Image (cartoon, helix red, strand yellow):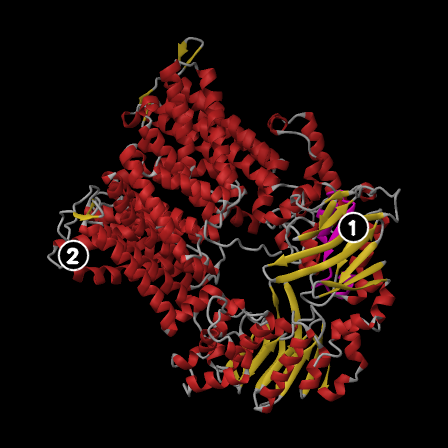
Amino acid sequence: MLQIKNLEAGYGKVQVLHGISMEVPKGKVVTLIGSNGAGKTTTMRAISGMIKPTAGEISLSGKRIDGMESFTIAKLGLAHSPEGRRVFATMSVTDNLILGAFPRLTGSRPKGDVAGDLDKALELFPRLKERRTQLAGTLSGGEQQMLAMARAVMLNPEVVLLDEPSMGLAPILVEEVFRIIEDLKSRGVTMLLVEQFAAAALKVADYGYVLENGRISVHGPAAQLRDDPAVKAAYLGGGH
Amino acid sequence: MKRKSLVAGVIGIAILAAAPLYTHNPYYIHMIGTIMIYAILLFGLDIVVGYTGQVSLGHAGLFGVGSYTAGVLFLKLGAPLWLIIPASIGVTAGFGALLALPALRVTGPYLAMVTLAFGTIIQILINEMDFLTEGPLGLKIPKPSIAGVQLDENSFYWMVLALMVISLVVVDRILKSQLGRAFEALRGSPVASDCMGVSVYRYKVYAFVISAGFAGLAGCLYSYSEQYISPNTYNFELTVLFLLAVIMGGRKSRIGSLLGAAIIVILPKLLDDLELFRMVASTLAVLMAVGGAIAVSRKMTTVRAMALPVVGTIALAGFSFWLQSITDWRLSIFGLMILFVVYYLQDGIVGFVRGLLVRKGSGGGRAIVLASGAHKDAITQAASTHTGEDLLVAKGVLMQFGGLKAINQVDISVKRGTIHGLIGPNGSGKSTMMNVLTGIYVPTAGAIEFAGRSVVGRTSSDIALSGIARTFQNVQLFGEMTALQNVQVGLHHTFHSNIVDIALHSPRHTREEAASVERGLGLIDFVGLADLANEEARNLPYGKQRLLEIARALALDPQLLLLDEPAAGLTAPDIKELITIIRKIRDHGITVILIEHHMDVVMGVCDRLSVLDFGQKIAEGKPADVRADEKVIEAYLGGTAA
Amino acid sequence: MEILLQLVYSGIALGMIYAVIAFGYQLTFQTSDTLNFGQGDALMLGAMVGLTLVNMGLNFWLMLPIVIAFGLVQGAVVERIGVAPAIKIKSEFGWIMSTIALGIIFKNVAENIWGRDDLKFPSPLPESPLKFLGANVLPMEILVVIGAVLMMLAVEFFNRKTIYGKAVVATFNDRDAAKLMGINTGLVITFSYALSSATAAFAGALIAPLTLTGATMGAVLGLKAFAVAIIGGLTSGMGIIVGGIILGVAETTTGFYLSTGYKDVPGLVLLLLVLAFKPSGLFGKTAIKKV
């Protein structure tokens, strides 16, 4: 579904990613974990077109998407719930969700039943249903995170990128967020999950990659990685 | 290089001085005189536009203030020349200060609008206050007299020449001194300026005042030169013309200002003569087409990029043949020239020529040979008598943004002479803490004491000057200045010489400047960048830029150094070097607070660690203890979540 | 007292025009962090084009939509030539200077086509004043207020009810996130400039019968409208209407009680004061610095 080969990317003079390769098969949840500064968010941004890769290939359903503008990539079916959520603060919850379906409403993607999908999204996120006319900027952090995820799903995407959904959230909200990810998984949504919190991510994912200083240091089935001491080392500098 | 330009300068002045002897037509003498008068104003305008990087649409107004001060003083008081010149400079400088007030807190388009409003108000006032200025009727003022003898066209010309040369030298000296560096710092990074002790507010005012002073001098001379002034001269078009001159001639360049002045004086005359214009436009179109073809064939640019200017100049030439008179289209020509310069000639003609020459000649910076051991004294030994006492004490700090508590009741105390680490997951409040400590944010509540004095509510530049220096997570160097100049900005606090010292190159100033170069080089050597001292900061590799920031911060002679993720983006060997440097800094008695994610740096170098999570301190102590702390592991790995 | 009330009515009409232009500044600033220094000239062109059409015999009311269409094109041209390239090279100086340059060019072209003198614009409504609350008000002034309000409401409707309008608001809010939704933000910016000039052109055609119409009418107008935009805070819609009315009334009263030469001064001084003391405007919110 989503294939990344030897991706290199960075910001201006700083090269952050030094050639990483990953694969997100259809219907699976893959997680990318690593400490801060390792390059996780950079990877997401390179995939969704927010930054242009300097080398390497990214393919969505066999089609090359590296170098494209993010609005073109979105139209091809890649939804990105970005780091920091970035909901449209002066618009209502409903409007935010409708905008998630923008390519469907403007002819770039098969329309399907937008109104029906909107209802389904609100059912999946009862907290959002209660606040559907409220301005997104007045929602709490946890609610905004749910809105960002629901908005991404409104695209009817091939793949969803979830960038640090737990960031800045209190532990109890983190639990709720991961419950929702589990639910999406059970509905067959293909996801690439980037997380600071390795334990929670590895519990919900099928497969995991560990990013250290811009390179994949370890990867394997999530269950295996959970007990791998290398994972702990990547975060707390264990062996140095 | 310096000697060459000095010789060229003297020759240039000699040619200008000889002009009246060469041509007996007062028309040309007057024209060259006007060019020189405009050049004086442009020297000053360049300070605001070229150095502090702001657009000023009010300089025609300041020019008008200078002109009218001269005119009114003469008309109402019959004042003599030696009174009028300083008065014009002084009054206009005062207006410059007045202009700086609303401009203090704004930048970019807002500042441009402020200057435009200001210039418009001045024009209206000159027009309406006819009891003072004779309003739309205008003022007549004869050539000045010196010692009872009225100056004729030629002697007035020589006086203007003399004043222009003096202005050029003074401006040049100012811009090469610590003042010039301060002005450039404002453009490079206002936040970094403040944190290096160069108060953005204060230096903005200086820039406007000095710039206005020159505009006043130019205005005064203009009155004498024209012998008749009226309000509608000092309008929007003139101010735009001044801007065009500065950017077309070339920013940050005295020659650029002279060239620009020549262009805007000669151009309208050129445009009055249609035949001449047709010739020039056709030649330009041919040159552009040929030049474009060569550039494309040499792969220096693409057909697409050249299409617009080539088509544009051909269209212009064609248009000129269709017209009966070009005078009415003057402003459109100026508008097109501005567009051209903004997109294709960003460094002006001078910059363009320099670019061509540099490619042929030597590379950017010359390496500087340092006397060995020079750096040993570069870092002032911070007072080491009280090692172990509390240097920084923060109690109950609360930083709230709307509903979000970025820092929630945090207590931290840092002992003098230690390296104290501040770690925690993303969004835990570390950088916010650093911004609070350096006055970028004012804490919602809580007390912060540094060396016994409260930090809360003080400006960033005040805090910097009292001993707290910092580096930034996103590098905030002054890009267009060299590495050495960046560090010299940090050394700004060592300068006590004022503008008079600078203008006259007094011994005090020369001494201070030399000392700053020596110390600056020493600091650069300390971080290992000695051979890059003359390289522009923006051209340095990323790792070196981060080290340069440290050198610049050390120039403040701080007692406390805050490092914000210094290892971010560095390669392994660079990180090793960084650790050595941090240790050396501590050995000089300077206390360090370090925010970092690279655990090997943190564990290897810190004496003590504080861990933040969700804006609260969850652990503190020796690195080994903290690393094993359950709460810390959970915060980073999210152990029991989900 | 009657005179004062009359001045207030004229001031309100004038203020609404400022508000409409200020609205245009808000539009482009919110989507792209840039604004058009030649906004006043867009208004002037609207008035001049309108005048030509009316003089050719076209009905005033039919002329309005044509002027709006003209404004749309003019705004798009300004954006493509002057702003988009500057945004690409991330040069603030670039778009400031190029929108100034384009403004100058438009003004010069107008001077050459229509001459430098002020022209009379025939009023579509009767010129005899009506009595409202004891003072005179011109029917045209009422039309101006209604027209301005209607236009701003129309844009609001577009923003709230249509998917394209929502896309524009999303771009205001967060450009990067909007792109992730599949929104071509470059086109949104071009559109916001087009709309901004269209509203200014429309305002120009409306106010032309009330004041002298000429190539120079745009100059100070753009500056004063900027003052209104600032007073209102570049993010508040209500604020600019209030700001506009304050400025309009201040201007008509100064013009009458002091002298017409000074009538532009209160607006300009107000601009300086607001930027000196509360740069985010009376209604706006201060931004938080991020380092």
Q: Note whether B351 is above or below C65 in the view shown.
A: above
- Type of residue at label 1? Val
Q: Which residue is mark 1?
A: B393
Query: Which residue occupies 54% across, 43% down?
Result: B52
Which residue is at the far top?
B148
The numbered mark at residue A146 is none
Q: Note whether B213 is above or below C219 in the view shown.
A: above
Which residue is at the far front?
C133
Which residue is at the far left?
C57
Classify residue A212 as left or right of residue B239: right
Q: Residues within 10 Å of mark 2 (few under 14, many from 20)?
A: some
Question: Same chain for marks 2 and 1?
Answer: no
Give residue A101's position: percent from left, percent from top: 45, 79
Q: Note whether B72 is above or below A239 in the view shown.
A: above
Tag 1 secondary structure: strand
Is residue B588 part of the magenta span, yes or no? no
The part of the chain drawn in magenta is: B547-575
* Marked residue chain, label 2: C
Q: Quadrant of residue B594?
A: bottom right
Q: Which residue is mark 2?
A: C53
Tag 2 secondary structure: helix
* Marked residue chain, label 1: B
Q: Quadrant of residue B397?
A: bottom right
Q: Is residue A200 or residue A35 the one in the foreground?
A: A200
Report if residue B289 is visible in the image.
no
Q: Are marks 2 and 1 in contact (CB under 8 Å)?
A: no
Give residue A70's position: percent from left, percent from top: 50, 73
Give residue C68's position: percent from left, percent from top: 26, 61
